[in-house]
Image (spheres, rainbow, N blue to C red):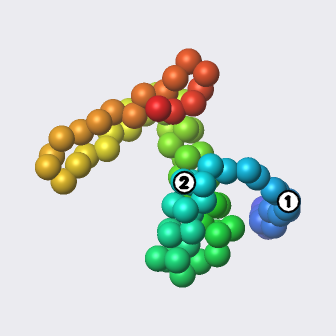
Amino acid sequence: MKRPTFTRKKKLVKLSVNLPEESVEYLWAYALIHDITMTEAFRRALGLQSFIHKEVAKGTIVYFERQDGSCDRLVSTALGGIR
């Protein structure tokens, strides 16, 4: 008989960060538009960055397609970041 799988709740850690004013303004606007907290807006932004970083690290090619049909490729840098 298989043992049941239990999902552990992720431990939350309080974090204080210094961000450029432009980033804070973006997070604030995003939170306001989506009726969420700044914390949730930050989580979503970090989650998206994490997803993209992992995909690029696996060799996935990520493109952004504009409304006019033109595309830009997301390129990883030598330091593992994304530009």
The residue at which mark 2 appears reads as: 22
Asked whether residue 9 appears in the rendered view, the answer is yes
The kind of secondary structure element at disc 1 is loop
Disc on res. 51? none
**Residue 81, relative to residue 29: is it above or below?**
above
Q: Amino acid at mark 1?
A: Val
Closer to the camera, 59 or 19? 19
**Extreme left residue here?**
68
The residue at which mark 1 appears reads as: 13
Closer to the camera, 76 or 29? 29
Distance between the alpha carbons at the discs numbered 1 and 2: 25 Å
Does residue 73 appear to the left or right of 10 in the view shown?
left
Residue 21 position, x and y percent, is 60, 54
Between discs 1 and 2, the one toward the N terminus: 1
| Quadrant of res 5 | bottom right
> Circle 2: is it few (<14), some (14-19), or many (20+) Cα within 10 Å?
few
Q: Amino acid at mark 2?
A: Glu
Asked whether residue 3 appears in the rendered view, the answer is no
Residue 33 position, x and y percent, is 47, 76
Quadrant (top left/top right/bottom left/bottom right) for the N terminus: bottom right
The structure residue drawn at horizontal position 55% and vertical position 62%, both measured from the top left corner, is 25
| Quadrant of res 45 | bottom right
**Extreme front residue here?**
21
The structure residue drawn at horizontal position 85% and vertical position 59%, both measured from the top left corner, is 13
Residue 59 position, x and y percent, is 46, 28
**Residue 23, relative to residue 55: is it above or below?**
below
Does residue 19 appear to the left or right of 14 in the view shown?
left
Does residue 60 appear to the left or right of 66 in the view shown?
right
Closer to the camera, 11 or 2? 11
